Amino acid sequence: MQPDRSSPTSSPSRAGASSKAPGAAVGAPQRADATIEVAKGEEVAVRVYGRKLPGKPSPLVVHFHGGAFTTGDLDTGCTVADLLERAGAVVVSVAYPLTPFPQPVNTGYGVLQWAFRNRVKLGGQGAQIYLAGEEAGGNLAAAVSVMARDQSHPPLAGQILLSPMLDPCVGTASVREATGDATGCKWTEGWRNFLRCPRDAEHPYAVPATAHRLAGLPSTLVMVGDTDPMHDEALAYAARLESAGLLVRRHVFPKAGEMPEALESGLRECPCAEGALVQIRQFFEDTRCPAPT
């Protein structure tokens, strides 16, 4: 697990054993925390889940945790990262800065570039690259996808968006129904913290759901709960991607009233976990193809 110039600083993760733990059993869960350089003078903490399998490439996923752009860390992202690992992926989960746009997106793109450079070491020869995120992290995953498309690098096999937070207007019927008579809304506050000014809401790297051009983006898996506040904006984005001629898989989980909060570590296991695992495994299978060099 090394960037091009040097090895990152690694230490055992609070979520589990380091990938260098002596005597670890084959197939045992793997966790390793590291600090990597994504730009000159800029470092970011990541947590790597899983390990390369002999003779078989694994999907390599760059993952962004939720937290409405105001909270969240590597620990709160464990629930979704664990699901991705259980589905067969090596996961690089990102402790992106909780600062206004564009820094979190730029950092995410830097981690994506690092993961691509190290894809053989992390996922094996032929490993394909994916982006994934829940809630605010879903927005960042979608934004980094647009950025990678515009830069024509690196090639992406797909993006996985769980209850993605995509609409800064925070006015969909599903949000209104979920918040009811509450006087405060964490998603409204989150967007206020993320967007520096109204014009940021028009930038496709800040709000990818408003991008005028969606052609060329990777295949997408969108998962959301039936009573999820993010329900309407997630499915609206899926419909826009599909209208642009892209491969889109969508799945709505019934009786998932705790989403997106249930996607965060520290709560009881997400009620949609097993269903999500099935969807993610199938998406990896559907998008499997020889990876570009």
Image: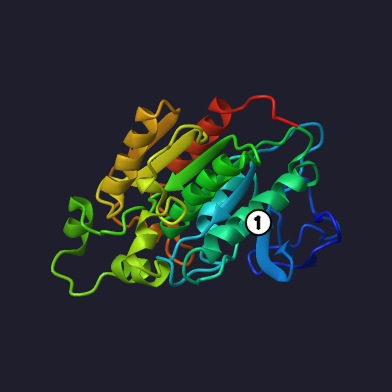
- Lateral position of residue 214 relative to residue 6, left or right: left
- Lateral position of residue 232 relative to residue 23, left or right: left
At 61% from the left and 43% from the top, the residue drawn is: 151
As shown in the figure, which amino acid type bears the numbered disc 1?
A: Gly
- Pick whichever, 144 or 25, lies toward us: 144
- Pick whichever, 143 or 88, lies toward us: 143
Q: Pick out the residue farthest to the left.
A: 181
Quadrant holding the N terminus: bottom right
- Lateral position of residue 229 relative to residue 250, left or right: left
Under tag 1, what secondary structure? helix
Where does the image place residue 45, in percent across and percent down from the top left?
66, 67
Where does the image place residue 104, in percent across and percent down from the top left?
54, 63
Q: Which residue has dot 1 on it?
A: 110
The quarter holding residue 95 reads bottom right
| 9 vs 214: above or below | below
Residue 255 visible? The answer is no
At 66% from the left and 41% from the top, the residue drawn is: 154
Residue 218 visible? The answer is yes
| 129 vs 264: above or below | above
How many marks do you count on the picture? 1
- Lateral position of residue 240 relative to residue 247, left or right: left
Where does the image place residue 71, in percent across and percent down from the top left?
46, 72
Where does the image place residue 165, in percent across and percent down from the top left?
37, 55
Density class for disc 1 (Cα within 10 Å; few <14, some 14-19, many ≥20) is many
At 74% from the left and 42% from the top, the residue drawn is: 123
Quadrant holding the C terminus: top right
